[in-house]
């Protein structure tokens, strides 16, 4: 999927399984069907650089982001500072390599829905300087009706945006 859709950025929102065969030592090659995967860095586990090579096509550099969950308490709702930092890091990388972003979580909707919603809200907020969170969610739900289906997820998005605006105004006043 990542290769077919020419995605250069992958966001993994679930806890990593460090025993899985993808997480190799640096520069060790993992062969999987028609693909070779090489991990280019090991210095930052929250931002892995991979080289994905297809035997019949070229190679692609992929950045895999994971949230820093060292102080996370709830598996579904990360502290707002962690998800906002993750969104900033993903956006910074996307500014350098514009293209599709692949967002993955275990059920395909709960954490992914929150991440995608927050990304779109922050993008619209930067452009319009105002936002209607309900409208953003309704627009997303046209294609993915399973995204943001309960009140806790809405509340979490509002809290994250509130924290983002408070931090942004703090820096603007300095």
Image: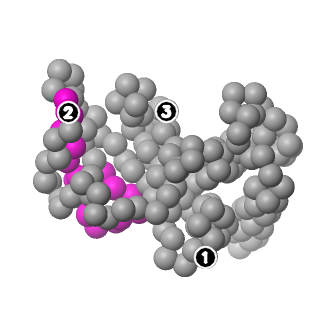
Q: Quadrant of the C terminus?
A: bottom right
- What secondary structure is found at the residue carrying circle 3? loop
Report x, y in % for residue 121. 73, 45
Classify residue 10 as left or right of residue 135: left
- What secondary structure is found at the residue carrying circle 1? loop
Which numbered circle lies on residue 100?
3
Which segment did they paint magenta?
Answer: 33-49
Q: Marks 3 and 2: CB-CB under 8 Å?
A: no
Is residue 161 something that shows in the picture?
no
| Of callouts 1 and 2, the N-terminal one | 2
Report x, y in % for residue 72. 57, 74
**As rendered, which of 21 and 160 lies closer to the eye?**
21
Local packing at callout 2 (Cα closer than 10 Å; few below 14, some 14-19, many 20+) is few
On the image, numbered disc 1 is attached to which residue? Answer: 73
**As rendered, which of 160 and 114 lies closer to the eye?**
114
Q: Marks 3 and 1: CB-CB under 8 Å?
A: no
- Give the residue at x 59% y 66%: 75
Which numbered circle lies on residue 101?
none
Classify residue 78 as left or right of residue 69: right
**As rendered, which of 125 and 60 lies closer to the eye?**
60
On the image, numbered disc 2 is attached to which residue? Answer: 33
Of marks 3 and 2, the one in the foreground? 2
Instruction: Give how far apart the Cα atoms at labels 3 and 2 are.
Output: 23 Å
């Amino acid at each position: 999927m990542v290769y077919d859709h020419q995605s250069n950025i992958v966001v993994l929102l679930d806890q990593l399984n460090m025993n899985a065969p993808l997480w190799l030592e640096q520069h060790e090659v993992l062969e999987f069907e028609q693909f070779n995967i090489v991990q280019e860095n090991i210095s930052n586990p929250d931002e892995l650089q991979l080289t994905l090579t297809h035997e019949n096509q070229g190679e692609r550099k992929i950045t895999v982001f994971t949230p820093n969950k060292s102080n996370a308490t709830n598996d579904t709702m990360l502290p707002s500072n962690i998800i906002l930092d993750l969104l900033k890091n993903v956006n910074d990388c996307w500014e350098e390599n514009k293209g599709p972003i692949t967002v993955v979580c275990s059920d395909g909707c709960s954490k992914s829905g929150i991440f995608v919603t927050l990304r779109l809200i922050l993008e619209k907020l930067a452009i319009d300087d105002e936002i209607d969170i309900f409208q953003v969610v309704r627009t997303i739900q046209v294609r993915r009706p399973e995204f943001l289906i309960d009140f806790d997820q809405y509340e979490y998005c509002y809290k994250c945006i509130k924290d983002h605006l408070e931090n942004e105004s703090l820096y603007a006043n300095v």
